[in-house]
């Protein structure tokens, strides 16, 4: 059920990291502890995704909101810690959102709670964001009811289906170096 999503995330992360000579670098993350860090060089860290064993889940968000999150959301955020990854889906530039460490995971879960609470207030279809786009008013998200990956207009609430599921979405992402 969720195994294909997990394998697709690991496969994409591997493809994304393989485009770098040694490993992805980040200046933004240099002062923030993480099991992802391979090496620190002055004000830069070299990192790689860190597989979580056992995987994490978003059960706190489910309990706070009294909602069941789509299994793909648990897999997407609970499989690994990593830096955010710049990528592209079709003609959409995006940044795949990932948690960097335990504290970041907790912050991310709080943001998911806030996002879903706002959607409920506005009587919109519940979604879980997974990527930002170049457009300030658009995100890429999982439709919590169907598991489809959608482009969501944050102003109107309009959802445009990108793929039927997370596995398909991750397998279609185009990697390109961002640093």
Image (cartoon, rainbow, N blue to C red):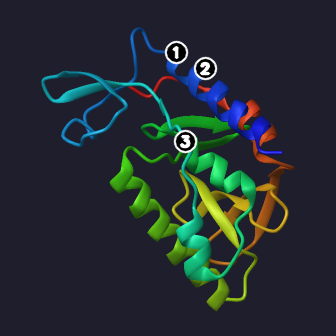
Left or right of 98 on screen, residue 87: right
Is 36 above or below relative to 75? above
Which residue is rendered at x = 82% and y = 56% of the image? 161
The C terminus lies in quadrant: top left
- Camera-near label (2 vs 3) is 3
Which residue is rendered at x = 58% and y = 21% of the image? 14
- Residue closest to the far front: 54
Q: CA distance from mark 2 to mark 1?
A: 7 Å
Which residue is rendered at x = 43% and y = 55% of the image? 105
Crowding at label 2, few (<14), some or many (≥20) Cα neighbours within 10 Å? some
Q: Which residue is mark 1?
A: 19
- Residue closest to the far top: 21
Is 104 above or below relative to 116? above
Foreground pick, 9 / 57: 57
Snapshot quadrant of residue 143:
bottom right
Q: Which mark is residue 74?
A: none
Q: Which residue is mark 2?
A: 15
Task: Tell me the element at label 1.
Answer: loop
Q: Which residue is mark 3?
A: 54
Residue 94 in the image: x percent, y percent?
57, 44
- Camera-near label (1 vs 3) is 3
- Camera-near label (2 vs 1) is 2
Is 120 above or below relative to 163? below
Crowding at label 1, few (<14), some or many (≥20) Cα neighbours within 10 Å? some
Snapshot quadrant of residue 6:
top right
Mark 2 in CB contact with mark 1 (< 8 angstroms): yes
Residue 83 in the image: x percent, y percent?
42, 38
Residue 30 in the image: x percent, y percent?
22, 35
Left or right of 59 on screen, residue 147: right
């Amino acid at each position: 059920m969720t195994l294909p999503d997990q394998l697709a995330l690991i496969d994409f992360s591997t493809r994304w990291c393989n485009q770098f000579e040694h490993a992805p670098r980040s200046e933004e993350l240099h002062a923030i502890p993480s099991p992802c860090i391979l090496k620190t060089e002055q004000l830069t860290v070299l990192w790689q995704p860190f597989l979580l064993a056992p995987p994490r889940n978003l059960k706190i968000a489910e309990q706070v909101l009294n909602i069941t999150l789509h299994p793909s959301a648990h897999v997407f955020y609970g499989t690994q810690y990593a830096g955010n990854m710049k990528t592209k889906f079709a003609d959409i530039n995006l940044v795949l959102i990932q948690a960097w460490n335990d504290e970041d995971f907790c912050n991310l879960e709080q943001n998911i709670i806030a996002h879903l609470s706002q959607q409920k207030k506005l009587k919109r279809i519940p979604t879980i964001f997974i990527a930002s786009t170049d457009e300030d008013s658009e995100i890429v998200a999982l439709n919590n009811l169907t598991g489809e990956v959608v482009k969501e207009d944050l102003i109107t609430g309009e959802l445009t289906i990108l793929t039927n599921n997370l596995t398909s979405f991750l397998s279609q992402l185009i990697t390109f170096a961002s640093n």
